[in-house]
Image (cartoon, grey):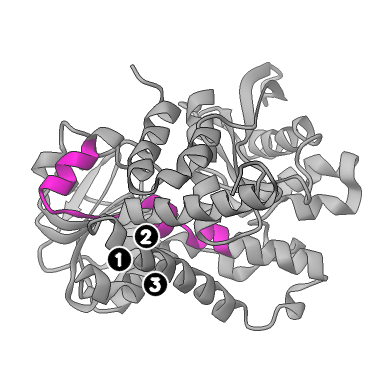
Amino acid sequence: MTGLLEQAVHRLDRIMGIDKELADICRLLKLPAELIERELAISRDDGRTDLMRAWRCRYNTLKGPTKGGVRFSASADADEVKRLGFLMTLKCALLDLPFGGAKGAVRIDPQTLTDAERRQLAMAYGELFSDTLREDNDIAAPDVATTPEDMGNLVKGLEPAHNSGSAGAVMGKPVDIGGLSIREGATGRGAVFLLQRLAEDLGIDLSSARIAVQGMGTVGLEFARNATKTGAIIVAMSDSSGAVLNADGLDIEQLSQQKATGRLNYNNDCDAILKVDADILCLAATSDVIDASNAGGLSCRMIVEIANAAISVNADEVLSKNGIIVGPDILFNSGGVAASHLEWLAYRKGGKDKLGDIEAMWKDRLSAAAGSVSSTIHECDGNWRNAALLYALRDLNAVAIGQGLFEN
């Protein structure tokens, strides 16, 4: 089977067909700058020493220090980490952030960890990668199954190597050690903000939209909460255990409480979410949910791809043929990295009070990215993913030319 990274970079070939001057940057991005793979050890509460594989991929450094989340996942592997670092590179370019892309992971089922083991794991990751995680080199952040508390413990793991500088190498921290409150739920909120910003261009009226959401984690629930504030109706939500469907609309707060207490009554299987008749299908769970085998069975007008790589490359042609608009991941899940950038700025400037209106800065960054994609959509026959890729690649290409890597 073709590797995950190989599939992802295949999309670049389409962009070269739109702008042949991007051939050099597309070739450069087909491999990561650096992949570090190491064994991490923790002591289990029963006294056993447990070894697990851990990774850090610094995908591209053209724009500055690399930036990317750390995930705890039983399915993590090197190929997945490289693909995610590639996508983060494009996302940072699209948002015009002074970062390259990175990603980190530990192959572990986080549900098997006690609180003490989890603290130890986050600290061990920081210690293991203290040679690369620095504010001017590589910056970590939360990702799948990691939290602000994990980031705080990662900082502690870095402290023996970097002392007070450790906080600048980790974003998404608790507020009491330098995190920003805007980071909480920023990915889900950002996706709703972008839908509002692009409503006219997309032909979607969010205030009357019927939405199905795959994913009842932090991102999916935050997206649903903010979408309902605009007037949208959430007609279905799902997680790995099943789906809850209600054509009249779900009470998101009630659903969230029921899920948290284990009292959620699912009324359908989890795959039912993909067949719900809705204006928008929001993918906020895992990667590779939509592929060629199920893309033809969707009943939505638009997909909002919040989860990284939720749509496989082999589904692109089917979705396009069926007239389904795709809001790509490198744009619609960018609220988190935009917030992390503000936290990084606050650290470098000596505190959040030095930034001014943080909420306005966050919205301005997302709005500018939305405008950037809109400015290239006419070159891409209405394909929003291609438009986002085109703008990001032109940004990276200009930087590479400015650094003398390519001839102008």
Q: Please give the residue where the numbered disc 1 appears in the rendered image.
A: 252
Name the secondary structure under disc 3.
helix
**Nearest to the observer: residue 66 or residue 43:** 66
Among the two numbered marks 1 and 2 on one chain, the one whose residue lies closer to the N terminus:
2
User: Between 258 and 245, which is closer to the camera in this rendering?
Assistant: 245
Q: Residue at x 54, y 56 (%)?
A: 395
Are discs 1 and 2 less than 8 Å apart at CB?
Answer: yes
What separation in Å lies between label 1 and label 2 (alpha carbons)?
7 Å
Q: Amino acid at mark 2?
A: Leu
As drawn, which residue projects farthest toward the front? 408
At 25% across and 76% down in the image, what residue appears? Answer: 200
Query: Circle 2 sits on which residue?
Result: 221
Q: Quadrant of residue 226?
A: bottom left
* Span shown in magenta: 315-338
Query: Which of label 3 and label 2 is nearer to you?
Result: 3
Secondary structure state at the residue bearing disc 2: helix
Q: Is residue 37 visible?
A: yes
Marks 3 and 1, how far apart at CA: 18 Å
Q: Quadrant of the N terminus?
A: top left
Q: Earlier in the sequence, mark 3 or mark 2?
A: 3
Label 1 Cα crowd, 10 Å radius (few <14 / some 14-19 / many 20+): some
The x, y position of residue 254, in whole percent, is 30, 65
* Residue 406, position as x, y percentages in the image: 61, 42
Question: Could you tell me residue 268's position as x and y percent?
Answer: 14, 45
Left or right: 48 as drawn, with respect to 270: right
